[in-house]
Amino acid sequence: MLRKCLFLLLIALISDTILSVTVTIPENVVVGKAGANVILPCTYSTTVGSQFVVEWKFAPGNTQPTNGKQIYYYSGGSTYKPGSQADRLSSVQKQPTSGVASIQLSNIAWSDNGSYVCEVNNPPDFSGTGAGIVQLSVLVPPSAPTCQMNGNAITGQDVTLTCSSVANPPAIYTWAFEGSKTPLLPGMMLNQESGSLLITNVSQALDGTYRCTASNELGQNTCQIGVTISSVAEAGAIAGAVVGVLLALLLIAAIVFYFLCYRKKRKDVPKPDYPGSDIREDAISPMVTEEQRRSVVTSHSRESRGRHDDNTIV
C-alpha cells in the first residue's frame, strides 16, 4: 500500500513538472541609446506541444502593462507582427521553440520607451508562471526646447520664463541673459529641473533676449525668447488704444445693424392695390349714362366760364 502511494505521488510530481510553463526574464530593465539595437530577453521551460504560443505586448510610456497591445505572435510555425514596430522587430530565434522567446528591436527611438510583456502558452500546461515584464529605457539627448513667457512684462511686475524639452536622462536647464556679463542678475531665480526662470520686479534694464540651454550626458540644445519691458504709462496707453478700437468696432457694427433692420422694415411695408383714394369734385360716376355725362360736362363748362368772367371784371 505504501509503495502504491509513493508511486502515485511520483507520477503526480512528474505530471506537474511537465504540465507547467515557467517564464524567466533574465534582465528586467534594458537601457539603450537612441539609434542602437537592443534585445528584450525572455526564456521559458515547458514541453512544446501543437498549441504552443509565444506572444509579446507593448505598453508605451507609463501605460500599465496589462493595457499593452500585441506586437509579436508566434503559433504553429508562423510569425505575426501587427504593431507599428514590425519593421524593426525580429525574433532572436527564428523558431522560438527551444526555450528562448527573446526579441530584438533595432534603431530604437524615444517612442519605444515602455513595458514589454512576454507570454508563453502551451495548453494543456496551464500552471506555473507564463508571463514576464521587461522595461525598456531609451536614452536620448534633449530635443529642441520650447521657450515661453508667463505674466505681463510691465515695470514692477513679475514674469516667469519656461523651458521644456524631451530628454532621457532628464535634462538640466540653464538660462542666460544675452549681453550680460553674468548668466543671471539679482532678482532672477532659476529652477534647473523644471526649466523655469522667475524674474521679479522687472525693469527696463532687463529688456532683451534670454537663452535657455537643455543638456544631459548625451548632448544639449537651446532656444531663446525676446522680452520687451513696458512702463505702466505705456501699458495704460496700449490698453486705452485697444479699448478705443473695440468701441469703434462696436459702433460701426451697431450702425450697420441699424441700417440693415431699417431697410428690412421698408421692404416689409405693404404697397396699396390702387394708385390713390383722392376724389375730384367734378369727377363723374362711372354708373351715369352717356347723355347724363354730356349734360354734366356742359354744366361744368358753363360754371367755369362764369367764374372766369367774374374774375376778369374785378
Image (cartoon, helix red, strand yellow):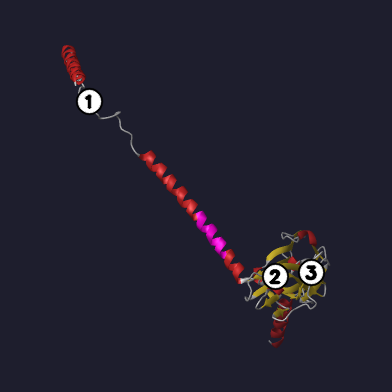
Looking at the image, is mark 3 or mark 1 nearer the viewer? 1
Residue at which label 1 appears: 280
Residue in the foreground of this view, choosing between 111 and 221: 221
User: How dense is the environment of label 2, judged by Cα within 10 Å: few (below 14), some, or many (20 and up)?
Assistant: some
Q: Quadrant of the C terminus?
A: top left
Q: Nearer the viewer, residue 295 or 255?
A: 295
Q: Are marks 2 and 3 in contact (CB under 8 Å)?
A: no
CB under 8 Å between callouts 1 and 2? no
Left or right of 142? Residue 282 is: left
**Residue pushed farthest front?**
314
Task: Looking at the image, tell me whether mark 3 or mark 1 is earlier in sequence order.
Answer: 3
Q: Quadrant of the N terminus?
A: bottom right
Q: Earlier in the sequence, mark 2 or mark 3?
A: 2
Residue numbers of the magenta segment: 239-249
Query: Where 264 sits versus 158, above or below?
Result: above
Task: Tell whether label 1 touches label 3 (CB within 8 Å).
Answer: no
Q: Nearer the viewer, mark 2 or mark 3?
A: 3
Residue 59 lies in what quarter of the image?
Answer: bottom right
Give the quadrant of residue 39. Answer: bottom right
Disc number for residue 61? 2
Residue shown at 67%/77% (left/top)?
Answer: 198
Quarter location, residue 3: bottom right
Residue receiving disc 3 = 221
From the top left corner, tell me how far across and down residue 85 is, in percent. 75, 61
Mark 3: which amino acid?
Asn
